[in-house]
Amino acid sequence: MPVIECDVEAARERLEDAGVAVESGNTDHERWRASREGATAVAYDDKIVIQGENPQDIEALLREDGGRAHVYFDGACRGNPGPAATGWVIVTGDGIVAEGGERIGTTTNNQAEYAALISALETARDYGYDEVHVRGDSELIVKQVRGEYDTNNPELREQRVTVHELLSAFDEWTLEHVPREINARADRLANEVLDQG
């Protein structure tokens, strides 16, 4: 059960900015309560106590210091183009903070990779990290974003611009190509979403 000592009104604003509904407390001692992903944050005068399953999601939103995260992304496609999905994972020294994936319709594999990267970066930004180290197993996407490769595909160019805009929100970032086995969890998430289709 994490306990965060902080300015509880500033923490409330961070939660509301992230779209989390904040309600009045249940007792005279509780300033407010907020729930997200199976966990509830209860604010007292100078601290917040997080209860329930998956406390890391709401805890990430409440941290004041930004911090550093490792971000993994992968896109999956059955056929090229074909039904596609994304998978991504955000990890800190405390473990997995968030992960997700979704079906994105019919696209190419490269478009799915970019969509996964964009979703992962949007989530890392929303959690308030100021430093991200991004890893993916698509050498093409990594090298396009780093400027080592160009692309003539207008959709990929547009997605690359979106990635650059998202990366500019962080004080520091790196982007690295890694073998598929290093990226296994993001890969599995994307494929599980497709299998559920």
Image: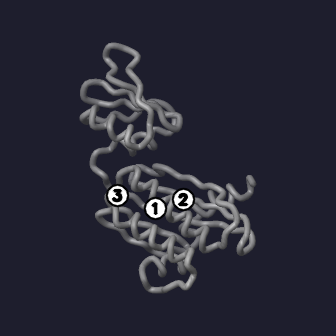
- The relative height of residue 89 versus residue 133 in the rendered view (above or below) is above
Which quadrant of the structure image shows residue 64? top left
What secondary structure is marked by label 3? strand
Indicate the position of residue 15 as horizontal and vertical percent values. Answer: 38, 39
- The residue sitting at 58% across, 66% down in the picture is 74
The residue to which callout 3 is attached is 68
Decide: marks 2, 1 in contact (CB < 8 A)?
yes
Q: Tell me which amino acid carries mark 1.
A: Val
Using the image, tell me which numbered label, if any, was put on residue 71.
1
Pick the front one: 164 or 30: 164
Amino acid on which disc 3 is placed: Arg
Q: Secondary structure under badge 2?
A: strand
- Which numbered disc flags the more N-terminal residue, 2 or 3? 3
Please give the name of the residue rendered at 46% of the width and 67% of the height, measured from the top-left corner.
Answer: 162
Give x and y (percent) for residue 89. Answer: 51, 57
Q: Is residue 153 above or below residue 71?
A: below
Q: Residues within 10 Å of mark 1 (few under 14, many from 20)?
A: many
Q: Residue at x 25, y 24 (%)?
A: 45
Q: Which of the labelled discs sits on residue 155, or is there none?
A: none
Q: Is residue 126 left or right of residue 130?
A: right
Q: Disc 2 and disc 3: Cα gap in Å?
A: 16 Å
On screen, residue 52 versus residue 18, left or right, reads right
Q: Residues within 10 Å of mark 2 (few under 14, many from 20)?
A: many
Classed neighbour count for the residue bearing mark 3: other residues with Cα under 10 Å, few (<14), some (14–19), many (≥20):
some
> Mark 2 or mark 1, which has the lower sequence index?
1
Task: Establish if 46 lies above or below 168.
Answer: above
